[in-house]
Image (spheres, rainbow, N blue to C red):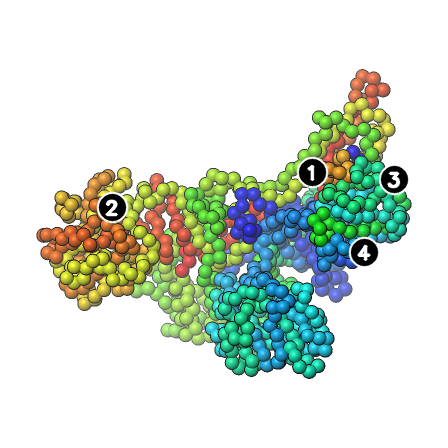
Amino acid sequence: MEFIKKSYFDTTTMLTLATGSLTAENMLYRDTVLQWKSENAGTDASTTSLVFDFGSTLSVSRIALIGTNIKAFDIFYNGTTASTLDLTTTGGTTSSNWSTNSETSMYLTFATIQTQTLTFDLKQTQVADSQKAIGYVHISDTTLVFPRIPSAKDYKPLYIAKEIGHKMSDGATRIQFIDTKFSTQIKFKYIEASFRDNLFDVWKTNSDLTFVGFGTQTSWDEVLHTVVWGGKFDFYKYADNSPSAGFTGKLLLKEAT
Amino acid sequence: MSSLKNQIKANKSRVFRRLFMKRREQASGLFESSWTEITSDVMKWGKLKTTIDEKQYNKFKFSGARFQLSNDSGRYNPEINPSSLWFGYLSPQRSLVRVEAGFVHETMGADGIWSRTEYPNDEVLYRNISYASAASSETFSTTTAKWGFDFTTTAKNLYLKDMSFNIYKSDASVTGYAVIDIYQGSSITSGELIQTSNSISMALLTTTGSTITTNTITFPTRVKLDPLQNHFWVFNVENVVQDNAGGNYLWVNRSSDTSSGTWFSSDSGANWSLGAGFTYAHDMNFYSDSSTSVFSGFISGDIPTSAKNIVQMSVQPLSDLFRQYPARLLDGWTSTGLTASQFVESVRDHTDGSGVHVFLPFFGDTTTGFIIQTTTVQYGFLNTSTASEVIDSNVWTLIEKLAQSETYVPYVTRSGEFNFVARDAATSTTFEFHGAKSKDREYGLTIKDIKKFGVKYSKYYSRVDVRWSGADTETSIQTTESVFEVSGSNLPWTYGHKTLKQEILFIQDANTAKAVADTVFDDVSALRNEIEFDASFVPQLDILDRVNLTYNNDTFEESSLWDLQNWSELLATTQAASYLDTSGAGSNGLSALGSGYRLAQHFISDTILSYLITVKVPLQRTLVNTTAGYLTMEIHNSSSSLPGSIIGSSDQLDLSLVPTSQPTITSEWVTFSFSAPAILSVGGEYFMMLNPEYGGSTDRYKWFTSNLSAGSSINYVRISFDSGSSWNNSSNILMGDFILADGPLVESENTLFWDKQSGDALKLEDREFKLLKIELDLDKLSTKITARDAQ
């Protein structure tokens, strides 16, 4: 569980691609239904490359891919195919080369690299010879990795729909749905002062945050959202009668966009 | 299958709302090229309202819009603030605003790729008539060859945007260009050329057809296609050049669709043959322009911010641009004046004197943003900016007055297109609303509540006065009015002789004023119902669209119509011969001659109500020898299965009200009203007896049936040739159709319902209305509609 930085990939001008430029913008949006799609590349015989150039060297240790249909692909940095990522998330591979991927989303954590470019070489699709597609790409580094995770009862992720209910003339109900937003409440007990202080730094940040629940390379629940942490900061409250017991408090995170 | 109708009726659907704005450059003052989306800042959307005829006949009224926006990021600060969206641009005032709303349908294919379709989307007339293999192609080998394809437009006004074909050439040496010509008319030889596409450069074509790629063909201006008209598109290769000798030089793929409608000419269109030269339809995409836009306007007025950083943004409809502009600043006047359409064109083309358009940038910066129907009357005073009619007027006032003079309507469509067109509402239904117990699989149930329904007596007028001249002369007021007489069927007598006065001083002569009076009279001189109802989100409707509405709040037929024997709505033509002939020996249906003849139908009252007020039957007067007279319908007790004592008689029905042609719909049936109700008992057996005694001794009437097998031990007929002294019960005679009701019936075409009375439920059956007011609540995603009986 962690807060990560805003995606370095925040404009299509930093992306070089040979196909599907009209839909490249879709990879910027968390809405996975909006996808980048290759054009005239519906064959597993050819590779489609996406090259992200951040304009300067940055620290990168997290990549999220959501809504993809890619089976075989490589990720490398600084334009060198041998410069693969040293993955630390549990998955089928520890280097960033996949040949039989069946996941539609994955959260990659890896040893921090310093790079100006990242390259995705997309080779084959899960249904052979389909157009290649990716819904969302998030490339960044960590802001705060929680040193511990909350207990099950203290982590309450919710998806809340914005919808309008109509009471029809026959008594039936009709719902017109507008969008879904994520929110969560996380409660910690007995945390150390250092974690409290780190949380306080995050809370004081005059900016939105990117929250990741339990990022995994396989069977990921796709909990990665841009959130705001509003309201009070109450982690200065002691968890028990002894100061050494640590602190207790709650985070209330609501999706921002 | 996903479609707008399916999205509207879905129990759960996804809706989108988007808000865009377009700023003006600081130096040039012109609009930037692209829209900026500000949806994420919207806290409240408000309502969008359009009305016609509310206060004044033929007058549109457009509401503005008011959006509540979050200004946490300072984006709506004044343009001098660096965080403002307008920093570096002109003031937010007069920035363009567009609202889009509709449904979105999302599905993921087996290949892991999502498809996302928004509705309303481009209405497709013909799309992807399936591509065949590259081997199936039509060839052009001579520049005099032409191919055509006919198609009929749908009910709405459509705008042809582009077409797509798969075209390829024989080799790289082929140059020049081809075009698509659009014709309108009943035949391809006499059709009028209404548009030619932009050219399709041969240089851009591939030399192989093995891979299906489409070539999109666009049009220089949007082509308006009149609804429900026959059209043709024609592939014209006159300007294609083949540099090498011999052989076919251009191919267009064709499908295996063998439908008719393909035409061929070998002599540049002088002669055409249907289906000759090739058999198959060609591939085509054919769109009409219908966007998700629901409002277009411009920012005007104060933009206050609250302590909570909430901004109110007022947006005016585009029509207000004309209201703000003095007419005297226009140009294009000619010494002989202008027609109304020429005046509107001069508004469209008006520049600031340096060649920069004043209004066009607000309408897509293209002349196709103005739909102007041609008018012919010359308005002499439109010859100078100092004319008295011009000098103190704004542009909108002049446009409105000219529209009144022409019985036109000026309005801006949902998508921001200016229209100056005749008030000819759509002639066919664009949507159906259903409510309460009405079930419809195609449109589903969309009515939430009916707020008001009833006859709009306040909009009934028996006389229309049009004053066209300020002088007090005999002809300065032209009048069209109903004949007034004291009669039960005379509307002025029944509802009052009411006058609608209109002063349209722009009208140039008495004849035109009379024509305007006639047109308005046609619209206002009939009693019409108005309805106001709430529906779920239906975003695609426009003012004057026609809709059908069915609302069934109760079991009307069982409780309100006592008996109903209308076996089918439309009478089959075979019934034309189904009547009793002069000898009384006919085998089907019923008829009667005058003196002494009686037709009586047996029925059983089956409701708890006991007052018979209305009897409605399909009668035709087939022999007309009498100029005056009347019919009555009598109700008799049944005695030994024969008509017995009379218990009620209808009011006299004037013979002139009996149609001389076969009635085909219930609205054409004749209605017998009982001022003194016939009192019936539940389960009682009775006869309704047609008495033509005073209808002329030699006239003949047919009483039609819609069921040639109708007739039973309950529903049977008795006839008499001696004024009821004796009765014939021929077993071959069929039951005629009838409706008995305990109240007055009101009907329009294909519609029959019982006027609501106290304690009874409202029922509307497939009733056609035209829309007068549409209010789209974008926060509640609901639609409030006011509509009037369609004519």
**Residue type, mark 3 in image:** Ala
Identify residue for label 1: A182
Q: Chain of mark 4?
A: A
Q: Position of residue A150 (x, y in %)?
A: 76, 28
Q: CA distance from mark 1 to mark 3?
A: 29 Å
Checking the image for residue A111, the label placed there is 3
Q: Are marks 1 and 4 on the same chain?
A: yes
Identify residue for label 2: B612
Q: Tell me the SS state at disc 2.
A: strand
Earlier in the chain: of badge 1 and badge 3, it is 3
Identify residue for label 4: A16
Q: Are marks 2 and 4 on the same chain?
A: no
Q: CA distance from mark 2 to mark 4?
A: 82 Å
Callout 1 touching callout 4 (CB < 8 Å): no
Q: Position of residue A40 (x, y in %)?
A: 72, 59
> Residue at coordinates 53% horizontally, 71% vertically from top-left?
B279
Q: CA distance from mark 2 to mark 3?
A: 91 Å
Q: Are marks 4 and 3 on the same chain?
A: yes
